[in-house]
Amino acid sequence: MSSVDHSVTPLYAQALLQSAQRQGITLPADLIARLQGNERIPLAVQDELWECYCELAADPLAGLRLGLDIQVGHLDSAGMLLVTCETLGEALAEQVEYAPLIGAGGEFQLLRDGDEMAIDYLPQLKVRQAERVEAVLAGQLNLTRWATGGRFTPSGIWLAHAPLAPLDDYRALIDCPLHFEAGCNRITFSADQLELPQIQANSALRDHLRQLADQTLASLGQHSLAAEVQAQVRSQPRWGKERIAEQLGLSGRHLNRKLAEEGLSFKTLRESVLQEMACQALQQGRLSVAQIAEQLGFSDENAFVRAFRRWQGETPARYRASRHQA
């Protein structure tokens, strides 16, 4: 499922605030004020929070440490839904579906290759991507172990970026094989672990939470102008701002102003959708790079390659090759 809303649950933002407080980090008062009293935090504000947090922490592994401290409650009702599932496999399938409730900025995929499974994270982040990916995967590892009573045993963690600190520093925090510059962000494990029972399984509560999650997803989709823009771009990726605005009954200037109220811009939204569509097309492998570039409205293949390298930190060809490994 694609992100329905360019925002994050305030409970996840709260994890950063609590971590900063424990470390004696003083975040800007105006930034904290913008985090208070909101049903959702605009992703642009969350970006600013991450930038401040990492800069003031002065710790290259700040994201990794944060992920290891993440609690179920920081993931809002989606976190409770996941831990009340009967088995790990059921929980991971629900995670792919309901991750947008926690926040935008990336998607999950559950992949299988014979007896090996992978939970993949596909980031669409512009700020502190490496630190935030490490937070996501460390949180995934920590909470999955907790939910299965410590029985979950990963075979490896794969990270697309280069190490942010000496490998010994990573090994002191993460006790499973780490692979850097891997072209993907994933945790791999044996397929038989999908059957691991979860210690907080509760089918009645799970069903109730799933209904609430469906309602929340629908609500986010209905009330988010960003989601409407994303849907239009996904339908017509070659269209520009004025044509999209016209479809939404707005002028280009009015569209810009309303998106700015959500801390967003048309350019950012359009690029996030094009990035998502490009990654999906490259994974499917049916179209050439030149055909994907044309389909997404780029002037030529070189322009697409430059944009994709900016988004993902690698060429389309390398990305495609890495997705068909492991």
Image: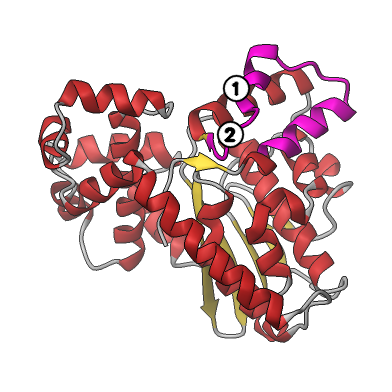
Q: Is residue 225 above or below residue 177?
A: above
* Amino acid under disc 1: Arg
Q: Secondary structure at mark 1?
A: helix
In this orientation, which residue lies closer to the viewer: 94 or 306? 94
- Image quadrant where residue 120 sits: bottom right
Disc 2 from disc 1: Cα separation: 8 Å
The percent coordinates of residue 209 (x first, y second) are 63, 68
Q: Which residue is mark 1?
A: 34
Horizontal arrangement in the rendering, residue 51 relative to residue 287 (left or right): right
Q: Residue at x 62, y 45 (%)?
A: 133
Give the position of the N terminus as an image quadrant.
Answer: bottom left
Q: Report the magenta residues as a range.
A: 13-41
Confirm whether residue 172 shows in the render: yes
Q: Is residue 311 above or below residue 257?
A: below
* Amino acid under disc 2: Asn
Disc 2, disc 1: CB below 8 Å?
A: yes
